[in-house]
Image: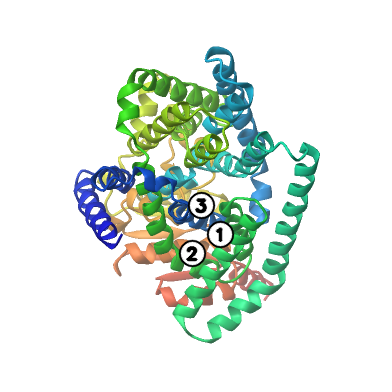
């Protein structure tokens, strides 16, 4: 076993170094590693090993935990339309279409057809969110829609797995199973809520008092794995417990440090997960059913893209809707779990299951290449696309310009003064409607989250003469200033507007050029007028 681990690490490192040279995502390297070690050491049967499957699943577990850290309960409620409306419609419509095709066209038994339809409706949370986070698109309009749909898909895994249990168990009534599930769900949610609401903050306080980094990391791992295990004991997925635990920690003061410490574990375990995906590629099945695979793969992809595009075009512009469809075209890792469990329970023909698994893996392999070229691909497919969303300014040639962060009321007033002084500037704004309105009148405003380094690099911030930060959100303000501080040198002036002296104190350690305190300065000016 040690020999296999060493060889796998060597192959994964070598392949990813090579692929990075050609700008190919590391996910492909991990999948290729899985194929190599499966055939090199005859490990196809190892994929049926329960312990290996559980270790691999924890890559998705840690991913779901870090996703939960980004979404408090209030945030989830604010996204209810993306999650429950668009996510719900996407899963139900896609499952209905694919299930009907499986049952009526391929004459697959109804229970199996329902499971196939639901499994194929799911996309790859692990791949999509990893790539969207890497390229910064998670904060764009289509990225938020995609995230909402993925979140509903992950929630939908619970009733799908329950359905497999109901279809396979004959000694219990459906009403009994549903009652037991509802009871287990109540216990899980109440238990994790109580821990998160009343115990986590004092627990982390005591841990940080120890001033021991390894104890802090150990406590995080305990919470993630403990919450996952509790969910598993109550017959739910490990990922659901981890996601809820992440949402609970998001309400504490330790959220950012927890996320920073957990990323190495997440990325390592995700690598193992993708290696196990590659290990499931059986070339004997691929060769035998190559014709069916070549026919079904593009049909499934096209159908899924069309469904998501037609759903999202009612909520956003055609460009963002198509990007959402192209991002979620693939079949996901949970489909692999569902197919494996289904033919283990005798609900799915093993040959059909193997063909579907190959199709799922191929679609996952295609995903990084599609997401890497999603903008030109969208342009090619939308011949009459909405040009108003394209950055018309050639940002790569900008030099000695001013970067304006925020294009609200204050930002627009600053922009007017800059134009009056004939100063070259470009603004970054995160409200999509504001960006659209500004671009219609040819204002140099682009859409993006200024807390992301790649967005600031896009506007050539390193070559700027000054940066003006005019955002109203105090929580985002510090993150944006930290990002600016990391990217710029001392010659670049940074002027920041804050609301009060408390916010000014928070920014003192960043060495900003000028911090203007809005409310207090306004009060002083008004009193001066009285004198």
> Alpha-carbon neighbours of circle 2 within 10 Å: few (<14), some, or many (≥20)?
many
Nearer mark to the viewer, of 3 and 1: 1
Q: Disc 2 designates what residue?
A: 259
Could you say where residue 226 lies in the image, as x and y percent from the top left?
A: 59, 65
Q: Neighbour class for label 1 at 10 Å: few (<14), some, many (≥20)?
A: many
> Mark 3 or 1 closer to N-term?
1
Q: Is residue 472 visible?
A: no
For the residues labelled 2 and 1, say whether their Cβ atoms are less than 8 Å apart: yes
Report which residue position mark 3 lands on.
411
Residue that label 1 marks: 69
Q: What secondary structure is marked by label 2?
A: helix
511 relative position to 26: left or right = right
Q: 294 left or right of 23?
A: right
Vertical placement of residue 52 versus 164, above or below: below
The x, y position of residue 97, in whole percent, is 58, 20
Which image quadrant is residue 282 in? top left
- How crowded pointer 3 is (Cα within 10 Å; few <14, some 14-19, many 20+) is rated as some
Q: Do tag 3 and tag 1 residues touch (Cβ < 8 Å)?
A: no
Distance between the Cα atoms at labels 3 and 1?
A: 30 Å
Return the residue nearer the eye: 256 or 99: 99
Q: Residue at x 21, y 52 (%)?
A: 17
Task: Tell which circle, 2 or 1, labels the residue nearer the N-terminal end.
Answer: 1
- Find residue 112 and report its image quarter: top right
Q: Nearer the viewer, residue 229 or 439?
A: 229
Between the C-alphas of marks 2 and 1, the distance is: 7 Å
- Please tell me whether mark 3 sits on a helix, a strand or a loop: helix
Q: Which residue appears at 60% of the width and 52% of the height? A: 240
Q: Report the number of discs.
A: 3
| In the displayed structure image, the side of residue 496 where residue 195 appears, left or right | right
């Amino acid at each position: 076993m040690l020999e296999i681990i060493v060889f796998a690490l060597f192959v994964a490192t070598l392949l990813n170094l090579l692929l990075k040279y050609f700008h190919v995502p590391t996910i492909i390297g991990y999948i290729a590693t899985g194929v190599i070690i499966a055939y090199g050491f005859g490990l196809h049967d190892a994929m049926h090993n329960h312990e290996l499957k559980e270790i691999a699943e924890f890559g998705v577990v840690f991913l779901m935990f870090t996703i939960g850290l980004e979404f408090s309960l209030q945030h989830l409620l604010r996204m209810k339309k993306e999650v429950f409306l668009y996510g719900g419609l996407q899963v139900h419509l896609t499952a209905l279409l694919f299930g009907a095709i499986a049952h009526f066209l391929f004459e697959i038994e109804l229970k199996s057809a329902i499971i196939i339809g639901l499994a194929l409706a799911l996309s790859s949370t692990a791949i999509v969110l990893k790539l969207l986070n890497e390229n910064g698109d998670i904060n764009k309009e289509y990225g938020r829609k995609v995230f909402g749909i993925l979140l509903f898909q992950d929630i939908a895994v619970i009733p799908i797995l329950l359905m497999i249990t109901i279809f396979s168990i004959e000694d219990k009534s459906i009403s009994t199973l549903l009652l037991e599930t509802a009871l287990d769900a109540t216990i899980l949610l109440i238990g994790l809520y109580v821990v998160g609401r009343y115990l986590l903050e004092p627990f982390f306080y005591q841990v940080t008092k120890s001033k021991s980094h390894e104890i802090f990391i150990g406590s995080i791992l305990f919470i993630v794995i403990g919450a996952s295990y509790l969910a598993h004991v109550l017959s739910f997925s490990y990922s659901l417990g981890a996601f809820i635990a992440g949402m609970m920690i998001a309400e504490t003061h330790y959220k950012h440090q927890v996320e920073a410490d957990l990323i190495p574990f997440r990325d390592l375990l995700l690598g193992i997960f993708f290696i196990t995906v590659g290990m499931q590629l059986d070339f004997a099945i691929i060769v035998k059913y190559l014709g069916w695979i070549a026919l079904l793969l593009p049909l499934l992809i096209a159908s899924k893209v069309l469904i998501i595009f037609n759903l999202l075009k009612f909520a956003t512009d055609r460009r963002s809707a198509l990007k959402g469809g192209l991002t979620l075209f693939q079949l996901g890792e949970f489909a692999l779990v569902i197919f494996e469990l289904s033919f283990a329970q005798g609900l799915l023909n093993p040959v059909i299951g193997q063909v579907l698994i190959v199709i799922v893996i191929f679609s996952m392999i295609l995903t990084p290449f599609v997401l890497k070229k999603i903008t030109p691909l969208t342009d090619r497919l939308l011949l009459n696309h909405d040009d108003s969303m394209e950055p018309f300014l050639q940002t790569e040639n900008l030099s000695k310009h001013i970067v304006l962060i925020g294009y609200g009321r204050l930002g627009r007033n600053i922009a007017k003064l800059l134009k009056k002084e004939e100063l070259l500037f470009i603004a970054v704004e995160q409200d999509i409607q504001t960006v659209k309105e500004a671009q219609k009148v040819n204002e140099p405003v682009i859409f993006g989250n200024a807390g992301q380094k790649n967005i600031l690099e896009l506007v050539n911030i390193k070559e700027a003469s000054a940066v003006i930060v005019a955002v109203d959100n105090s929580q985002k303000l510090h993150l944006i200033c930290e990002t600016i501080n990391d990217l710029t040198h001392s010659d670049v002036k940074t002027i920041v507007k804050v609301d009060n002296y408390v916010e000014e104190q928070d920014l003192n350690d960043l060495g900003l050029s000028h911090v203007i305190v809005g409310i207090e300065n306004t009060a002083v000016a008004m009193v001066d007028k009285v004198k």
